[in-house]
Image (cartoon, grey):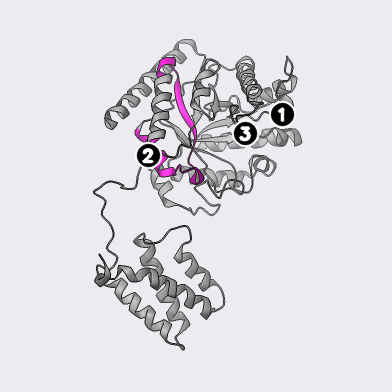
Amino acid sequence: MRAQQHSIFALVSILVSAVCARASTATSEIRPFDGADIRGANYCAAGGHHLEHWLHYDPRETARDLDYAKKVNINQVRVFLSYPAYLADKDAFRRNLVDLARACQSRRIGLMPVVESKRDMIGEAEPYPRTREWIKALLDAIGNEPAVVCWDVYNEPDYPDNPERPAHIADARVMARLFRELETQSPRVPITIGFAYENFMEQNADVVDVLSFHDYSPTRGEIRHHIEVAAAFAAKMKKLVVNTEIGCTARANPYDVAIEEYSNAHMGFYIWELMITRYWGNVHGIFYPDGTVRDPSIVAAMLGIFRNRSAQRVQEFPDREGRVTRTVANGTRWLSNTHAVYADGLELAETAANILEANQLVPMRDLPTQQVALLREKAPDPAALRDLLANLIKTLEPYQKERAP
């Protein structure tokens, strides 16, 4: 049944894509947009949040981060624009925006700019002078850049659920209308609104070219339900649908699980987010600025490789060749010797740490190998080494052959 559902989703995506492509060719109104093949990421420089990204924009940092994206097959980035940064220095903002678009284009990475709407624009009276100026500045800067694949004219106008939500949704609809009115190139870039909830996406489908919603669901069943509902609605509307935000450790929405479900359903997605940033970094992100990662399972998932969770999964046998037994014995011997050589203790601690991590016997939140590395980097600390080795040996002991189940 699951394979059949995924085949249906793939067929729907292909048919809708073909309809959109034919319409674009016939009318020259909208650029083609292939949502099914999107493996995207939301992108913000690691040093801060969206405002800091633009106030301190660095072309070299952008190039480096986009190179990281290419390594894991990311083919689109969704980037929030900053109206305050635009007001602070309009020429610099335009120059930086063009640099981003061209850095994306040189790597064949599509760009989905997310347009920020400030509070003083919400409910602005017609003819919306501030809003028009902002939109026109963006279109003048990058409206003709080939990297721009879709404008997200408003992020989550339906969130949170408070008395201001109707005004935000109304403003999002105004933004969509103004983008269509002000864009002069043909074919024009498609428009979307990144809704937090699928049902609000449906309610406002009439003002967008591409449907998009966010999904941080905590179970596979709920994720699949949202995919099914969104795909069925998209087919009915003859529009493409993508998910522009998935993946959050704090919301029981593991990256590898979410990516696997959207990949199997052939629905395009953008994870939140490419970099481990100062703002969201404790629950989101793939890369640190130096190119290392916190969780290799995210990288594997972006490459289409997923953890085996089936009944056929083969568990590691860490003491198959007696390494656990020897490490426990040698570590116990070192701990019992008050004159033990410090360097020998470090070697034993690293061996124990490697066994534990390689066989997935410890949580990877606090890496034993990192603890050993930190000890190696500073002056000898015998007490700290003894505490660490004792804990590592205690964790290893149950996995000795004679004690294994």
Circle 1 SS class: helix
Residue 118 x/y as whole percent:
70, 29
Query: Which span is picked out in magenta?
Result: 235-264
- Identify which amino acid the numbered label 3 is placed on: Val
Give the residue number, with chain letter if any, for mark 3: 98
Q: Residue at x 34, y 71 (%)?
A: 397
Q: CA distance from mark 1 to mark 2?
A: 37 Å
Which of pointers 3 and 2 lies earlier in the amino acid sequence? 3
Q: CA distance from mark 1 to mark 3?
A: 26 Å
Quadrant containing the N terminus in the rendered view = top left
Q: Residue at x 46, y 62 (%)?
A: 367
**Residues at circles 1 and 3 in contact by the CB criterion of under 8 Å:** no
Residue 57 x/y as whole percent:
65, 43
User: Does residue 354 appear to the left or right of 201 in the view shown?
Assistant: left
Quadrant containing the C terminus in the rendered view = bottom left
Q: Nearer the viewer, mark 3 or mark 2?
A: 2
- Identify which amino acid the numbered label 2 is placed on: Glu
Give the residue number, with chain letter if any, for mark 1: 119
